[in-house]
């Protein structure tokens, strides 16, 4: 495998950890200073800006109040002059007199052009015809609720009143000034009314045109409202028509506005800070209204010289920060070499743990699944079948663990194959045992084809070859939906001088892999997409290991795939044709039968008269050894720690024929106990066989056992065949 495919991304980091910590601390400190300074600047600028906005809003509201009151007062004076006109009073008293009507209409026409809006209306209480400008008059229904203003003006108003009218067709809000006309005889009896209108919409549009969105105040809004909180003037005329409440419309900015407005002194302007901006409230006494101006907060508020100065200061600080870090980096570089070794050791441990997780899942799944099947099996045959599958998967799991523990050798190109002669089809079946449970669980269709010319026995590394097949089949199962298809096709493509080149094709009908993703498949800890690990699981290590193993077998591995249609992994491996089938045939020809030697079972009573001292602190481990050797005739004594084993040997040095010694025990470990036994003056037989029995299976552990004085090594989990071979070697010669 190319070296760059084996190097995890973390290994490319060159910056020493101390430097990273210092840079991180400096960055955090700079960010804290930046944030604190920025917050202080924002608060200070916000107060200054809002103060300026308050002053500007106050001046603006006073100006607008004066403009509105001035315009309304001028119109009121003309309306009152018109209502007090003797000619108009005579006409209202006798509307059927044509001569009076003509003269009155001429005077009314003159008044109309005196109004700024050129709008005028009049009604006499005799015929109740509504006249408006030059329009055709029409009868007014005074009892209609929409015409409430008629009776209110005639019978409840002494001088004048106002009412608001919204015309949806023209989208215009008008303020109407109404004045009653009293009889010339008693000056008490109302005989009609006159009035004019002011288009508030035009007035408000003028305000927005002159002031909204300009100046320091930024974007501004203005509203007129009465003491009930009903909006009487706004840019959106629909608010006036709907009599929308000012507090409800403004939300956060309108909290307690009505109470504050009704408590204002004459010509007082009250300024309020709200979450959305600066608010100013002012009264319009002439109309018994109030006006509110809102200057909304905006990012453009900070477009000023103070902001520029602040940014310059930040820039200077950033330059100082960079220069300072460059200087410190030069001082810390000499520490880089001394810290790199510790960093690499921690990184290697992390990679090792992540690898263990992925590579152990599939055989453990087979063990758990077959355990469940065996537990619920109704027949002995079914239970035996489950036990066989569990045994096969467990042995494979042990092989995978050994491979994963050797992962550090891959980067150093020191991983070696363990070449043995094995039954090829049996190896395939063992590999399928590990994965078959998941295939059945996913209701997937599996097909296996082994070419007739593929040798039955081959010489190679069956554990590593099975690992490659399981890795590829596991991926196929993982990325293929239910009822999908998975296939394993094996064929012989070439044979030269008994060296067979065998081709393996693992195909599926799964999700497929894009061309871009295929280029990353065989890198360490990498999957086709980052989201695959979250959705399907896995560490991305399996294909990288498989590629390395295939290359050690003088083969190569490739992938063919199309998104949405499936994937095929093709790899080749070179192995020698085996001799086992020939040897067995020769032996059968000579004797007439094939001798069967079952190394997994002891011969009844074959170790009778022999005594074993079992030094093991774990109950279940002692029970396993005793059960495995049951019926062998071997007498087994127990020592629960190294000190107890030493005491028993010194008490009866000629009693025992062999010791199985665990390495890790309380009080005294196996290595120390062995040294003490070899050096004890009470034990004269210095060649007494002591066999290590431990889960520590590295070569360094085996060498340590031999150096301590042990004669051999049995790895856990125990292989019964190896245990029997060891006992026969030392007890039966």
Image: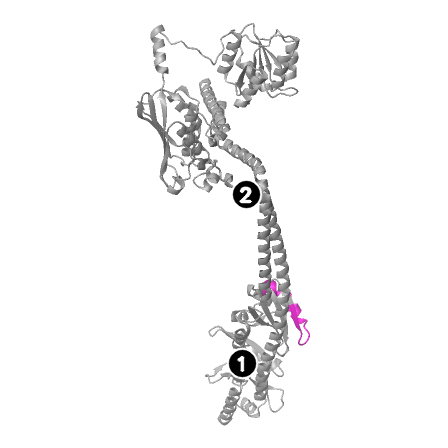
| Residue 404: % across, % down | 49, 29
Can you say which quadrant of the picture contains the N terminus? top left
| As drawn, 118 above or below 313 | below
Front in this rendered view, residue 725 or 31 = 31
| As drawn, 705 above or below 681 | below
Stretch of the chain drawn in magenta: 249-271
Sequence-earlier tag: 1 or 2:
2
Q: Is residue 310 left or right of residue 454?
A: right
| Residue 108: % across, % down | 52, 89
Q: Bin the neighbour count of mark 2 within 10 Å (Cα to Cα): few under 14, some 14-19, many 20 and up.
A: few
| Residue 328: % across, % down | 60, 47
Q: Which mark is residue 197?
A: 1
> Circle 1 sits in a helix, a strand or a loop, which is it?
strand
Front in this rendered view, residue 186 or 391 = 391
To which quarter of the image does residue 672 belong? Answer: top right
Q: Is residue 428 left or right of residue 283?
A: left
> Circle 2 sits in a helix, a strand or a loop, which is it?
loop
Q: Which mark is residue 306?
A: none
| Residue 419: % across, % down | 42, 21
Q: Is residue 343 left or right of residue 550?
A: right
Front in this rendered view, residue 69 or 318 = 318
To which quarter of the image does residue 320 belong? Answer: bottom right
Q: Which residue is label 2 attached to? A: 15
């Amino acid at each position: 495998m190319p070296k760059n495919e084996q190097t995890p991304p973390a290994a490319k980091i060159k910056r020493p950890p101390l430097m990273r910590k210092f840079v991180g601390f400096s960055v955090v400190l700079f960010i804290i200073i930046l944030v604190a300074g920025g917050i202080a600047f924002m608060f200070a600028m916000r107060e200054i800006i809002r103060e300026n906005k308050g002053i500007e809003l106050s001046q603006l509201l006073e100006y607008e109040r004066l403009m509105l009151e001035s315009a309304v007062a001028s119109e009121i004076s003309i309306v009152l002059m018109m209502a007090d006109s003797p000619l108009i009073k005579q006409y209202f008293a006798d509307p059927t007199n044509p001569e009076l009507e003509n003269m009155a209409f001429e005077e009314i026409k003159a008044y109309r052009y005196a109004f700024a809006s050129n709008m005028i209306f009049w009604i006499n209480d005799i015929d109740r015809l509504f006249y408006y400008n030059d329009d055709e008059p029409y009868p007014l229904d005074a009892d209609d609720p929409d015409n409430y203003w008629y009776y209110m003006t005639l019978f409840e108003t002494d001088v004048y009143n106002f009412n608001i009218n919204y015309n949806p067709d023209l989208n215009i809000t008008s303020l109407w000034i109404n004045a009653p006309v009293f009889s010339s005889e008693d000056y008490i009896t109302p005989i009609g009314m006159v009035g004019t209108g002011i288009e508030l919409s035009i007035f408000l549009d003028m305000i927005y045109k002159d002031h909204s969105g300009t100046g320091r105040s930024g974007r501004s809004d203005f509203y007129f409202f009465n003491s009930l909180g009903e909006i009487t003037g706004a840019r959106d005329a629909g608010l006036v028509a709907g009599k929308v409440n000012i507090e409800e419309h403004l939300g956060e900015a309108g909290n307690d506005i009505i109470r504050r407005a009704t408590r204002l002194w004459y010509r007082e302007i009250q300024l309020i800070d709200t979450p959305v901006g600066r608010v100013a409230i002012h009264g319009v006494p002439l109309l018994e209204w109030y006006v509110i101006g809102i200057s909304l907060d905006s990012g453009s508020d900070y477009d000023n010289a103070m902001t520029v100065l602040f940014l310059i200061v930040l820039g200077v600080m950033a330059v100082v920060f960079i220069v300072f870090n460059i200087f410190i980096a030069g001082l810390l570089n000499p520490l880089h070499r001394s810290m790199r070794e510790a960093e690499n050791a921690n990184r290697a441990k992390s990679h090792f743990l992540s690898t263990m997780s992925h590579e152990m899942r599939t055989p453990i799944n087979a063990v758990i699944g077959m355990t469940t099947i065996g537990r619920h099996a109704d027949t002995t045959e079914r239970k035996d079948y489950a036990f066989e599958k569990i045994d096969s998967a467990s042995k494979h799991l042990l092989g995978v663990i050994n491979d994963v523990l050797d992962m550090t050798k891959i980067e150093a190109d020191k991983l070696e194959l363990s070449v043995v002669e094995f039954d090829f089809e049996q190896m395939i079946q063992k590999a399928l045992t590990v994965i078959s449970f998941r295939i059945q669980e996913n209701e997937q269709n599996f097909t296996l084809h082994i070419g007739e010319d593929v040798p039955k026995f081959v010489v190679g590394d069956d554990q590593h070859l099975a690992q490659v097949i399981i890795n590829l089949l596991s991926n196929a199962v993982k990325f293929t939906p239910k009822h999908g298809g998975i296939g394993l096709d094996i064929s012989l493509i070439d044979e030269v001088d008994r060296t067979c080149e065998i081709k393996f094709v693992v195909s599926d009908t799964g999700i497929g892999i894009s061309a871009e993703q295929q280029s990353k498949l065989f890198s360490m800890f990498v999957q086709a997409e980052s989201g695959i690990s979250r959705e399907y699981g896995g560490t991305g290590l399996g294909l990288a290991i498989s590629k390395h193993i295939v290359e050690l077998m003088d083969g190569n591995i490739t992938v063919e795939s199309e998104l949405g249609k499936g994937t095929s992994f093709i790899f080749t491996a070179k192995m020698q044709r085996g001799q086992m089938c020939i040897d067995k045939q020769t032996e059968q020809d000579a004797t007439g039968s094939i001798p069967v030697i079952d190394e997994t079972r002891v011969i009844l009573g074959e170790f009778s008269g022999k005594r074993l001292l079992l030094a093991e602190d774990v109950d279940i481990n002692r029970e396993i050894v005793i059960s495995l050797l049951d019926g062998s005739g071997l007498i087994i004594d127990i020592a629960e720690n190294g000190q107890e084993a030493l005491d028993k040997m010194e008490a009866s040095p000629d009693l025992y024929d062999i010791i199985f010694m665990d390495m890790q025990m309380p009080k005294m470990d196996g290595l120390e106990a062995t040294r003490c036994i070899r050096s004890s003056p009470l034990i004269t037989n210095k060649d007494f066989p002591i066999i290590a029995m431990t889960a520590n299976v590295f070569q360094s552990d085996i060498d340590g056992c031999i150096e301590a004085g042990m004669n051999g090594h049995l790895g856990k989990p125990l292989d019964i065949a190896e245990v029997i071979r060891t006992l026969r070697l030392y007890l039966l010669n």
